[in-house]
Every structure is written in structure tokens, then in C-alpha cells.
Amino acid sequence: DLIQMQTDLDSLRFPIGKFKIPESYSKENFADWIHQIKELPKLLYAEVSKLSNEQLNTPYREGGWSIRQVVHHLADSHINSYCRFKLALTEETPSIRPYYEDRWALLEDGKNAPIEISLKLLDALHMRWVYMLERMSEKDWERKFFHPESKREFELKTILALYAWHSEHHLQHIVQLKKRMNWINH
């Protein structure tokens, strides 16, 4: 049945649901979202460090990226986000540079580089990013950048929520695949 197939595909593509812009923001939200970003490198390492090359090269869904590509994508995406934060904090509503994440994932390093490279990169990047995030003022969270693809401005508080979601979204791609494949960490 077509509707069930679409539902199954959506649950594989969006294991924690699609991102929704928060209706309101609280100090607790900020603390939770920063904590999610802070914890991602450790949680990701725990999920992928003992996987074989064959397992790392397994797509999380048909037509999706391999676990290896997901790990490298997280590094690529979060580097871009960190830079976008810095631009928004130092310029007046800068126009950010979009990139083709799907094409980046198909480059040689995205498909085949050892995951340890991106795991180390994420660890250092997230330490630096969280250091900055924890020191942002209330006014800083309202700073914006312009995204030329969507032709919209985004406040940094919304981007923080997005990247907390993004961290968990991709972590769950890996966790759910491991459950479906019955791969157990040792």
C-alpha cells in the first residue's frame, strides 16, 4: 500500500520527525540545544567506533547515505553552521553561502575517508562552537543571516534549534539502522 510505503520511507528519512521552528524560546531551550550539540561527538563516537568497514559503508536507507557519509556530512554541515554563526555575529545580516551537501557527500573524502578524521574534527569543532554558544548574549541570539536559496532571514536562536535537531536526526539514522540490522556495540 502506497501510503504505508511513504510513511515507512518518511520514518527512515526523518526518524525524529521533520524540523519545526520553535514557537517560543526559553533559557531552558537554549541550554538543552547547546547540550545536544555538546554531546554529539561523544554519542556519535559511541555509535560508530566499533563498526566494521562493511557496516560503515551500509546506507541507513535505500538510496540514502552510508554511515561513513553521514559522519563526514555532520562535519561538513557543522563547519558551515559554525562559520554562519560567526558571520552573523560579526556582520549585519550577512548573506551566507549555500552548498550542495549531496554533492559534498559524493566526493572521495565523503565516501571513503576514515571516519576518525571527521570524529576528531567534530570533537574539536563542537568544543569551540559550544564555548561560543555558551557565551552569547540575549541580543546575539536575535542576530540574523540571509539564506539566498530560501530568500529568508534566520535568527541564530532558530539555527541553534535546527542544529540540535540536525545532530539528533543523523545520530538516529545510525542508531535505527544498527537496530534494524541487529548490530550490537561490544
Image (cartoon, helix red, strand yellow):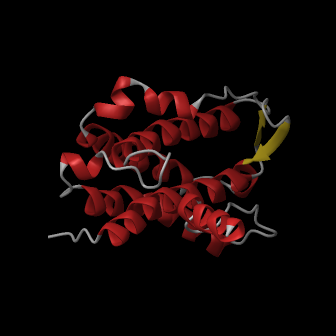
Horizontally, residue 54 falls left or right of residue 40, namely: left
Residue 143, image x and y in percent? Answer: 76, 44
Which image quarter is the C terminus in? Answer: bottom left
Residue drawn at 47 percent across, 36 percent down: 76
Tell me: residue 183, above or below residue 106.
below
Residue furthest front in the image? 1
Residue 122 in which image quadrant: top left
Q: Residue lying farthest left?
A: 186
From the top left corner, tell me how far across and down residue 15 is, in percent. Answer: 55, 66
The residue positioned 40% from the left and 49% from the top of the image is 59
Along the line of sight, the residue nearer the viewer: 33 or 77: 77
Residue at left offset 67%, top offset 62%: 18
- Comparing 117 with 91, the one in front is 117
Q: How many labels does the image show?
A: 0
Q: Where is residue 116 in the image (x, y as percent from the top left)?
A: 24, 42
Quadrant location of residue 49?
bottom left
- Quarter-of-image position of residue 33: bottom right
Report the quarter where the N terminus lies: bottom right
- Above or below for 25 versus 50: below
Residue extending farthest right: 151
Q: Judge from the rendering whether residue 109 lies leftward or rightward of residue 70; answer left or right.
A: left
Q: Which of 7 and 115 is in front in this view?
A: 7
Residue 168 percent across, percent down from the top left: 50, 63
x 47%, y 55%: residue: 61
